[in-house]
Amino acid sequence: MIDRYDWPGGTEAMLRFGPASGPVVVLALPPFEEANRTRTLMVSVLRRLADVGIGGVLPDLPGQGESLAATEDATLADWRTAFAACVATLPQPRFAASIRAGALVDGEADVQARWSLSPQTGAELLRELNRTARSAGTPEGAGASREAQPTSGHNRIPAQAGIQGQAEQRLAEQRNPGLLPAQEHGDAGAAIEIAGNRIGLRLLDALAGADIGTPDRIVRLESDARAAHRRLPYPPPWRRAEPEANPALAQALAADIADWVRTWRAA
């Protein structure tokens, strides 16, 4: 079912699955292209949870999915505020689930606990964006133009810079603690383009230091050797060229989330 929720910046859509009462899992997808690659899988997960009596919600966040807000205007603070507002409209008990950089979004929501698949910090997301920019291979001069020029002497990203050059310079600046955030010297509203997504500089600034907190349960795939409560023997769906439901992975994830919710409620 398609529903809507209000947040301080407007109204966004959300998909709802399963019963209207009882436990509900609210899902945070990763942003940008990875959302497209994982949405089909995670909708399948929420449908499977509904089949065992656990409600599910998949909200669109500002500038993502079917949101009417421009992608380049999206900020991390808005994503967190919108997600928390969506959660607040739902009955208790509420649980947050996230995949990859979705773990950057759900930490401020009023939930019983947080589950995450391969959580990704802001710095890790920036490195991923840098790799995407490199693989795009766009010639210099063919990238997106700046929406606004800096009003100070900090010409942080040259106008008409190519995708690779924009991303590399921005990431280099974020590693330099002597430089101020974009919004402090006139870059508010500026954006760069990476693989078809216009991304605001304020969002890139915020991602540089953004952490995921401490999810209560972390699941990873077998190619990821970092610490996890469970590891599943499947390839990463966010690396596929085209979205795929992968029924076996969807079932494994749904079963893990369902068992986790039941265990948490019984504790």
Image: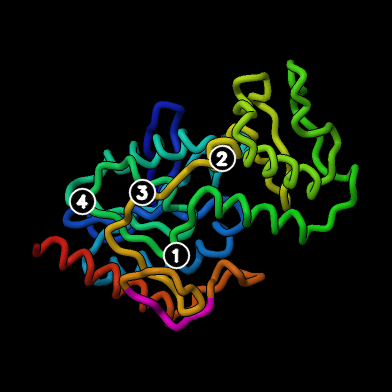
Q: Quadrant of residue 203?
A: top right
Sequence-wise, the earlier of marks 1 and 3 is 1
Distance between the Cα atoms at labels 1 and 2? Answer: 23 Å
The vertical placement of 196 against 182, above or below, is: below
Q: How many residues crowd around disc 3 within 10 Å: few (fewer than 14), some, or many (20 or more)?
A: few
- Mark 3 to mark 4 CA distance (whole Å): 15 Å
Q: CA distance from mark 2 to mark 4?
A: 27 Å
Q: Nearer the viewer, mark 1 or mark 4?
A: 1
Q: Amino acid at mark 4?
A: Gln
Question: Quadrant location of the N terminus?
Answer: bottom left
Q: Is residue 48 visible?
A: no
Mark 2 highlights which residue? Answer: 63
Whether residue 58 sits left or right of residue 20 in the image: it is: right
The residue pinned by badge 1 equals: 118
Residue bounds of the magenta highlight: 230-235
Q: Position of residue 12 (x, y in %)?
A: 45, 39
Q: Position of residue 195 (x, y in %)?
A: 73, 53
Between disc 1 and disc 4, whose residue precedes?
4
Disc on the earlier residue, 3 or 4: 4
Q: Of the residues shown, which amino acid type is indicated by label 1? A: Ser
Q: Is residue 31 above or below residue 267?
A: above
